[in-house]
Every structure is written in C-alpha cells, then in structure tokens.
Amino acid sequence: MKEERTFLMIKPEGVERGLIGEIIGRFERRGFKIIALRLSKISKEQAEKQYEEHRGKDFFDGLVSYMSSAPTVSMVIEGENAIAAAREMAGVTNPKQAKPGTIRGDYGLDVQRNIIHASDSEESAKREIAIHFENLRFN
C-alpha cells in the first residue's frame, strides 16, 4: 500500500446544503488524515487553473463561473492509496449513475452540482494542491 496525499474540494452546493461535516467525517472515519483545510470563495483564475484540462469544452465557462460563485472547502488528505480511495468514495461524476453510499450517489444533484471534486491522479493532486495551498509541499 502506498501512502499518498490527494486534493478534495466540496463544491458550492455542498457548503450551501450544510454537508461539510458529513463529507469530512466520511474521510476521517475511513482513516484519512486531513493535513490542510480551507473554506474560501475561490477566484475565477483558480477555478480556471483547477479545470484547465476542460478548457475549450462547452461546459468550461459555466463550470468556472459556478465554482467561483460561492464558498468551497478545499482540503488535502493523506493515507494509504488516498487518490483511488477518495475517487471511489466520491463516486462517478454523474450522480444519477453513482452508487448509493458514495458521496455523489447520496447527495449529488447533477453533473455540475455533484458535491465534490477529487483529484484523479498523483500529478493532478500535486498540481491542484499547489493551486489551493501554495505553501504545502510534498516530501
């Protein structure tokens, strides 16, 4: 098993619906350590960097606008196989296809308002951590 760090973000509707504690609790109960946590309204520029791989797609501008419209919770968790485990706990992108028991399956409304972002690879995790926690470094 590999000890990893990954980036998670509770999206605006998760904050607005009061799901912060529930979502953080799921990761803590699973044994992950939270090593960075921030409640903030991200800038348009941060949102653009966050979703850079989607630039040029028809949903990019709406996604950036949505993600920078209200507070989010950004966090870094650490633990064994954190990246794959967090993705599994989040569920598939479309909440209508996500399994019950996953965060998106239990709370997601639609593809954009799917409650949580979870990094999909070690490279993405490092890049996204640097966007939101510029002083946090990997050892």
Image (cartoon, rainbow, N blue to C red):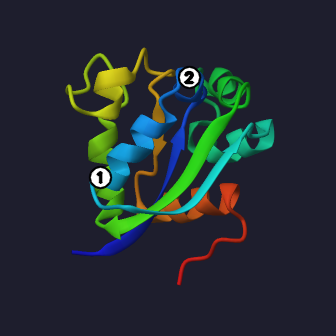
Q: Is residue 51 visible?
A: no
| Image position of 2 with respect to 47: above or below | below
Q: Which mark is residue 13?
A: 2
Observer-nearest of 54 and 49: 49
Q: Amino acid at mark 1?
A: Arg
Please provide percent x and percent y for residue 78: 41, 67
Q: Secondary structure at mark 1?
A: helix
C-alpha separation, residue under disc 1 versus residue under disc 2? 23 Å
Q: Residue at x 60, y 42 (%)?
A: 73
Which mark is on residue 52?
none
Which of the two marks, 1 or 2, is nearer to us in this view?
Answer: 1
Callout 2: SS: helix
Query: Residue 29 got which mark?
Result: 1
Q: Is residue 117 left or right of residue 89?
A: right
Which residue corresponds to the image point at 35% horizontal and 50% vertical from the top-left?
27
The reply, left or right, for residue 35 in relation to residue 132 is left
Amino acid type at image mark 2: Glu
Q: As displayed, is residue 30 above or below residue 63?
A: below
What x and y, as percent, mark residue 15? 58, 29
Q: Quadrant of residue 6?
A: bottom left
Tally of marks: 2
> In the depicted view, which residue is nearer to us: 3 or 111?
3
**Between residues 77 and 129, which one lies in front from this camera angle?**
77
- How many other residues sit within 10 Å of disc 2, few (<14), some (14-19) or many (≥20)? many
> Is 2 or 75 nearer to us in this picture?
75
Question: Is the Cβ of the residue at disc 1 closer than 8 Å to that at disc 2?
Answer: no
| Residue drawn where x is 68% and y is 30% of the image | 64
Specify the quadrant of the image occupied by residue 121. bottom left
Answer whether residue 86 is visible to the viewer in this image: yes
Q: Position of residue 89 (x, y in %)?
A: 29, 43
Q: Earlier in the sequence, mark 1 or mark 2?
A: 2
